[in-house]
Image (spheres, rainbow, N blue to C red):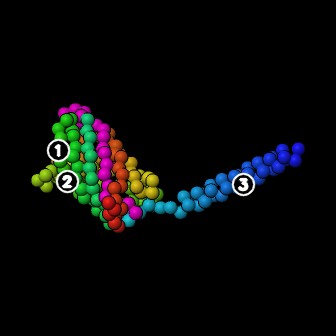
Amino acid sequence: MKHSNRIRNTAAVLVAAGMLWMGSTQVLQAETDEHETCSNAAAAGEWAYTETGTVAPASGTVPFAAVARYTLDKAGNLAGTATSSSGGSVSNVTLKGTGAVNADCTSTLTVGVYSAAGVLLRTATFALVYVNDEQEARALVSSLVLASGVSVPAVLTVDARKLFDGSRRER
């Protein structure tokens, strides 16, 4: 009987300790989440992304995909390169743009897409949200405008990951 009481008492103490530990972890997590914010400085670094979806120019709906690598500096300036396929036609382009990161981890990026000769082809605006401590981002193209000023309907999503922080590059 003494042995079963000891086991019961030990189990009760372990359950109580576990409950206290889990409760304190939840309070710590809630306090941490309340005070975390995003910023241009924290988002700065070297990034890579994939973009997929469809665009609907006057000629009809076509599939679109791209892979890109770009640098975002602490001032919100973006520069990079991409390889894209629009309806199966592959091209290499240069990216130049700006963005601002809000404290709630949302952002708007406006990116000019340029040919190898430096001619503006289109401008894309991205509605973006940073996740995973600004190590990843998800985005939707909210506006796609050709250099001629014509808006092109598009359903394009982006999955981006930070390769290196803006302050240093690790190998």
Q: CA distance from mark 3 to mark 1?
A: 61 Å
Q: Which span is picked out in magenta? A: 42-62
Which three-letter amino acid code belongs to the residue tagged 1? Ser
Side of 27 where 113 appears, left or right: left
Query: How many C-alpha atoms fall within 10 Å of the one at disc 2: few (<14), some, or many (≥20)?
Result: many
Q: CA distance from mark 2 to mark 1?
A: 10 Å
In percent of the image, x 35 and y 67: which residue is there? 167
Which three-letter amino acid code belongs to the residue tagged 2? Thr
Q: CA distance from mark 2 to mark 3?
A: 57 Å
Which three-letter amino acid code belongs to the residue tagged 3? Ala
Label 3: which residue?
A: 17
Label 2: which residue?
A: 94
Q: Mark 3, mark 1: which one is toward the viewer?
A: 3
- Horizontal and vertical percent for residue 38? 44, 61
Q: Are marks 3 and 1 in contact (CB under 8 Å)?
A: no
Residue 76 visible to an observer of this rendering: no
